[in-house]
Image (spheres, helix red, strand yellow):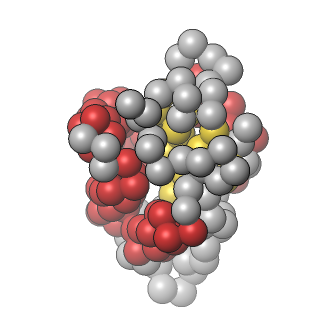
């Protein structure tokens, strides 16, 4: 049985699934200056998905947020690997254990084949933490990074 049964050869996610994830990102970012992105690809080029997440994070120029509070959720479908990488501003406030727990929670959903729900709930949890640590600033906040899912190979 495939880990991601909703995946077809032509499209990784259905339009509805993409919309659910993008809406989760937008909802998570409403009350924070933090930024969340999701990157999905088939295979991880590294043994450790955190290393790949770091490469993607900097490739997407996510370190350029004003408060260094960008968070990348990385998923390698065929290799069944996940990672979450937070920029230095948010990482200093929550530490490594937070990211590890978020990945474990997402894996619990994935193991029950609730893939999109797992991603969305992880985005929600990250958003709540960003809201606490980096609340929305009405006069200065802007959406610094696109909300759309980024698809690799």
Residue drawn at x 57%, y 13% as measured from the top left: 47
Looking at the picture, tell me which residue is in the foreground, 106 or 51: 106
Residue 129 location, quadrant: bottom left
Which quadrant would the N terminus be assigned to in this image? top left
Residue 148 lies, in percent from the top left, at 62, 64
Horizontal side, residue 125 vs residue 28: left or right: left
Residue 21 lies, in percent from the top left, at 47, 63
Looking at the picture, tell me which residue is in the foreground, 24 or 143: 24
Looking at the picture, tell me which residue is in the foreground, 114 or 99: 114
Residue 107 vs 10, above or below: the answer is above
Residue 123 lies, in percent from the top left, at 39, 57
Residue drawn at x 54%, y 86% as measured from the top left: 139
Horizontal side, residue 62 vs residue 3: left or right: right
- The answer to whether residue 62 is visible is no
Residue drawn at x 67%, y 20% as measured from the top left: 45
- Most extreme residue toward the bottom is 139
Residue 124 location, quadrant: bottom left
Looking at the picture, tell me which residue is in the foreground, 68 or 143: 143
Horizontal side, residue 10 vs residue 68: left or right: right
- Most extreme residue toward the front is 1
- The answer to whether residue 142 is visible is yes
Q: How many marks?
A: 0
Residue drawn at x 73%, y 38% as measured from the top left: 153
Residue 94 lies, in percent from the top left, at 32, 42
- Most extreme residue toward the top is 47
């Amino acid at each position: 049985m495939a880990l991601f049964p909703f995946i077809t050869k032509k499209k990784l996610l259905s339009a509805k699934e993409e919309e659910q994830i993008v809406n989760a990102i937008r909802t998570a970012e409403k009350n924070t200056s933090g930024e969340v992105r999701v990157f999905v690809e088939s295979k991880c080029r590294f043994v450790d998905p955190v290393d790949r997440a770091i490469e993607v994070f900097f490739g997407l120029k996510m370190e350029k947020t004003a408060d260094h509070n960008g968070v990348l959720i990385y998923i390698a479908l065929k290799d069944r690997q996940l990672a979450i990488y937070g920029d230095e501003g948010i990482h200093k406030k929550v530490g490594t254990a937070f990211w590890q727990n978020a990945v474990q929670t997402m894996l619990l959903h994935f193991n029950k084949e609730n893939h999109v729900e797992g991603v969305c709930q992880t985005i929600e949890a990250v958003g709540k933490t960003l809201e606490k640590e980096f609340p929305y600033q009405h006069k200065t906040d802007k959406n610094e990074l696109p909300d759309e899912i980024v698809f690799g190979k």
